Image (tube, rainbow, N blue to C red):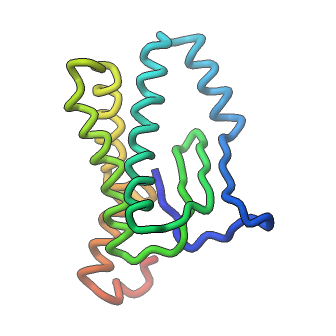
Protein backbone atom coordinates (compact mmCIF):
# COMPACT_ATOMS: atom_id res chain seq x y z
CA UNK A 1 0.00 0.00 0.00
CA UNK A 2 2.74 2.43 0.79
CA UNK A 3 6.36 3.20 0.29
CA UNK A 4 8.28 5.01 2.96
CA UNK A 5 11.67 6.22 1.88
CA UNK A 6 14.49 7.26 4.13
CA UNK A 7 13.59 4.83 6.89
CA UNK A 8 16.21 3.70 9.37
CA UNK A 9 17.60 0.20 9.41
CA UNK A 10 17.37 -1.96 12.49
CA UNK A 11 20.31 -1.98 14.88
CA UNK A 12 21.36 -5.37 13.48
CA UNK A 13 21.57 -3.92 9.95
CA UNK A 14 19.04 -6.42 8.57
CA UNK A 15 15.72 -5.68 6.93
CA UNK A 16 12.72 -5.87 9.24
CA UNK A 17 9.79 -7.94 7.94
CA UNK A 18 6.66 -8.31 10.02
CA UNK A 19 2.97 -9.07 9.97
CA UNK A 20 0.90 -7.74 12.85
CA UNK A 21 -0.95 -10.09 15.15
CA UNK A 22 -4.21 -8.30 14.35
CA UNK A 23 -3.73 -9.05 10.66
CA UNK A 24 -3.11 -12.72 11.41
CA UNK A 25 -6.22 -12.92 13.62
CA UNK A 26 -8.27 -11.18 10.92
CA UNK A 27 -7.01 -13.61 8.24
CA UNK A 28 -7.77 -16.55 10.49
CA UNK A 29 -11.28 -15.26 11.13
CA UNK A 30 -11.82 -14.71 7.41
CA UNK A 31 -10.75 -18.28 6.69
CA UNK A 32 -13.34 -19.49 9.21
CA UNK A 33 -16.16 -17.21 8.06
CA UNK A 34 -15.63 -16.89 4.31
CA UNK A 35 -14.96 -19.22 1.45
CA UNK A 36 -11.23 -20.05 1.65
CA UNK A 37 -10.90 -19.73 -2.14
CA UNK A 38 -11.89 -16.04 -1.95
CA UNK A 39 -9.60 -15.36 1.01
CA UNK A 40 -6.66 -16.98 -0.78
CA UNK A 41 -7.50 -15.11 -3.99
CA UNK A 42 -7.50 -11.78 -2.13
CA UNK A 43 -4.19 -12.66 -0.43
CA UNK A 44 -2.64 -13.65 -3.77
CA UNK A 45 -3.85 -10.42 -5.39
CA UNK A 46 -2.33 -8.40 -2.55
CA UNK A 47 0.94 -10.31 -2.92
CA UNK A 48 1.05 -9.57 -6.67
CA UNK A 49 0.41 -5.89 -5.89
CA UNK A 50 3.29 -5.71 -3.41
CA UNK A 51 5.57 -7.65 -5.77
CA UNK A 52 4.91 -4.93 -8.35
CA UNK A 53 6.28 -2.34 -5.92
CA UNK A 54 9.25 -4.55 -5.05
CA UNK A 55 10.09 -5.17 -8.72
CA UNK A 56 10.42 -1.45 -9.44
CA UNK A 57 12.47 -0.91 -6.29
CA UNK A 58 14.77 -3.72 -7.44
CA UNK A 59 14.95 -2.12 -10.90
CA UNK A 60 16.10 1.14 -9.28
CA UNK A 61 18.63 -0.76 -7.16
CA UNK A 62 17.06 0.32 -3.87
CA UNK A 63 17.38 -1.77 -0.75
CA UNK A 64 14.32 -2.80 1.18
CA UNK A 65 14.74 -1.70 4.79
CA UNK A 66 11.51 -3.20 6.05
CA UNK A 67 8.09 -4.55 5.24
CA UNK A 68 5.06 -4.43 7.53
CA UNK A 69 1.63 -5.87 6.83
CA UNK A 70 -1.25 -4.79 9.05
CA UNK A 71 -5.02 -4.44 8.81
CA UNK A 72 -4.52 -1.04 7.15
CA UNK A 73 -2.38 -2.53 4.39
CA UNK A 74 1.30 -3.00 3.77
CA UNK A 75 4.18 -0.55 4.10
CA UNK A 76 7.54 -1.06 2.38
CA UNK A 77 10.39 0.96 3.88
CA UNK A 78 13.19 1.81 1.45
CA UNK A 79 16.26 3.90 0.93
CA UNK A 80 15.42 7.48 -0.10
CA UNK A 81 13.67 7.82 -3.47
CA UNK A 82 13.33 10.79 -5.78
CA UNK A 83 9.81 12.01 -6.53
CA UNK A 84 9.98 10.40 -9.99
CA UNK A 85 11.17 7.07 -8.56
CA UNK A 86 8.47 7.07 -5.89
CA UNK A 87 5.88 7.90 -8.57
CA UNK A 88 6.84 4.83 -10.61
CA UNK A 89 7.05 2.65 -7.49
CA UNK A 90 3.57 3.80 -6.41
CA UNK A 91 2.16 3.02 -9.87
CA UNK A 92 3.84 -0.40 -10.06
CA UNK A 93 1.56 -2.08 -7.49
CA UNK A 94 -1.71 -1.10 -9.19
CA UNK A 95 -0.17 -1.93 -12.60
CA UNK A 96 0.69 -5.43 -11.38
CA UNK A 97 -2.87 -5.80 -10.08
CA UNK A 98 -4.31 -4.73 -13.43
CA UNK A 99 -2.05 -7.20 -15.24
CA UNK A 100 -3.65 -9.95 -13.14
CA UNK A 101 -6.90 -9.22 -14.99
CA UNK A 102 -5.22 -10.54 -18.14
CA UNK A 103 -5.28 -13.97 -16.50
CA UNK A 104 -8.95 -13.77 -15.48
CA UNK A 105 -9.77 -16.79 -17.60
CA UNK A 106 -7.55 -18.98 -15.39
CA UNK A 107 -7.79 -17.18 -12.02
CA UNK A 108 -11.13 -15.34 -12.05
CA UNK A 109 -11.39 -14.87 -8.28
CA UNK A 110 -7.89 -13.46 -8.03
CA UNK A 111 -8.48 -11.16 -11.01
CA UNK A 112 -11.67 -9.80 -9.45
CA UNK A 113 -9.95 -9.27 -6.10
CA UNK A 114 -7.02 -7.56 -7.84
CA UNK A 115 -9.39 -5.27 -9.76
CA UNK A 116 -11.20 -4.24 -6.55
CA UNK A 117 -7.94 -3.75 -4.64
CA UNK A 118 -6.49 -1.68 -7.49
CA UNK A 119 -9.58 0.51 -7.67
CA UNK A 120 -9.48 1.19 -3.94
CA UNK A 121 -5.72 1.69 -3.88
CA UNK A 122 -5.81 4.27 -6.68
CA UNK A 123 -8.11 6.58 -4.73
CA UNK A 124 -6.28 9.92 -4.39
CA UNK A 125 -6.02 9.60 -0.61
CA UNK A 126 -2.62 9.63 1.04
CA UNK A 127 -1.04 7.14 2.02
CA UNK A 128 -2.74 4.97 -0.62
CA UNK A 129 -0.90 4.59 -3.92
CA UNK A 130 -3.24 7.07 -5.61
CA UNK A 131 -2.43 9.69 -2.99
CA UNK A 132 1.28 9.04 -3.43
CA UNK A 133 0.92 9.38 -7.19
CA UNK A 134 -0.85 12.75 -6.80
CA UNK A 135 1.72 13.98 -4.29
CA UNK A 136 4.66 13.01 -6.49
CA UNK A 137 3.13 14.47 -9.66
CA UNK A 138 2.70 17.72 -7.71
CA UNK A 139 6.32 17.53 -6.51
CA UNK A 140 7.61 16.87 -10.04
CA UNK A 141 5.53 19.65 -11.63
CA UNK A 142 6.06 22.18 -8.83
CA UNK A 143 9.67 21.66 -7.87
CA UNK A 144 9.22 23.16 -4.40
CA UNK A 145 5.67 21.93 -3.91
CA UNK A 146 3.02 24.08 -2.27
CA UNK A 147 4.12 25.74 0.94
CA UNK A 148 2.93 24.02 4.11
CA UNK A 149 1.96 20.75 2.43
CA UNK A 150 4.02 17.67 3.23
Along the viewing direction, whichever of 15 and 21 lies nearer the viewer: 15
Total residue callouts: 0
Along the viewing direction, whichever of 135 and 111 lies nearer the viewer: 111
Q: Is residue 22 above or below residue 55?
A: above
- Seen at 31% across and 44% down, the residue is 96
- Seen at 33% across and 19% down, the residue is 109
Q: Give how far across and how far down residue 92 sits, in percent.
A: 33, 53
The image quarter containing residue 71 is top right
Q: Give how far across and how far down residue 75 sits, in percent.
A: 54, 53
Q: Is residue 112 above or below residue 81?
A: above
- Seen at 56% across and 60% down, the residue is 64
Q: Is residue 78 above or below residue 141?
A: above
- Seen at 36% across and 70% down, the residue is 85
Q: Give how far across and how far down residue 61 sits, in percent.
A: 45, 68
Amino acid sequence: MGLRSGARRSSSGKSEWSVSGRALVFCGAMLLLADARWVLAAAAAAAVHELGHLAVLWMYGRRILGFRADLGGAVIRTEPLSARQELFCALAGPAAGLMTVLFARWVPRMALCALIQTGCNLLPIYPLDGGRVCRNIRNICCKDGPKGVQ
